[in-house]
Image: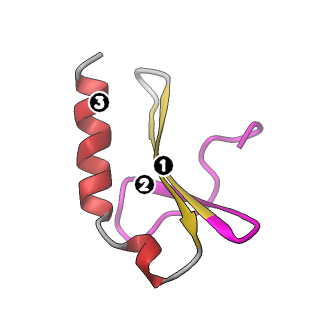
Amino acid sequence: MSESSSPAGHPSGQELYRLRLGDYRIIYAIFDKELIVYVGKVTGRSEKTYRNLNEILEAARRAVDKL
């Protein structure tokens, strides 16, 4: 992520990115205009990892809008 904040890891149709780090997945959103990377979830790799992606994205947008 230090070299590129937007690797090729999009959950289907979402504005979120995913990054695999060992046994973990990091779900995050990038707000280029504001120069913000919002980390929404860090969790072990499982089917549950991708639940509630819309809620994570909405939380990210609300957090950025408050700035």
Mark 1: few/some/many CA within 10 Å (<14, 14-19, 20+): many
Instruction: Residue type at mark 1: give it.
Output: Tyr
Q: Residue furthest bottom?
A: 47
Q: Residue at x 31, y 27 (%)?
A: 64
Residue 29 % position (x, y): 44, 45
Q: Is residue 2 left or right of residue 19?
A: right
Quick one: 34 or 64, which is closer to the camera?
64
Q: Residues within 10 Å of mark 2 (few under 14, many from 20)?
A: many
Where residue 13 appears, x then y in whole percent? 35, 67
Callout 2: SS = strand
Q: Residue at x 42, y 54 (%)?
A: 16
Rounded to the nearest angstrom, the CA distance separating label 1 from label 2 is 6 Å
Which scheme is used to colour this image of the protein?
Answer: secondary structure
**Residue tagged 2:** 16
Please give the range of residues in magenta: 1-24
Q: Which mark is residue 40?
A: none
Residue at figure coordinates x 45%, y 68% from the top left = 11
- Sequence-wise, the earlier of marks 3 and 2 is 2
**Label 1 close to label 2 by CB (< 8 Å):** yes
13 on left or right of 20:
left
Q: Which residue is mark 3?
A: 63
The furthest residue to the front: 44
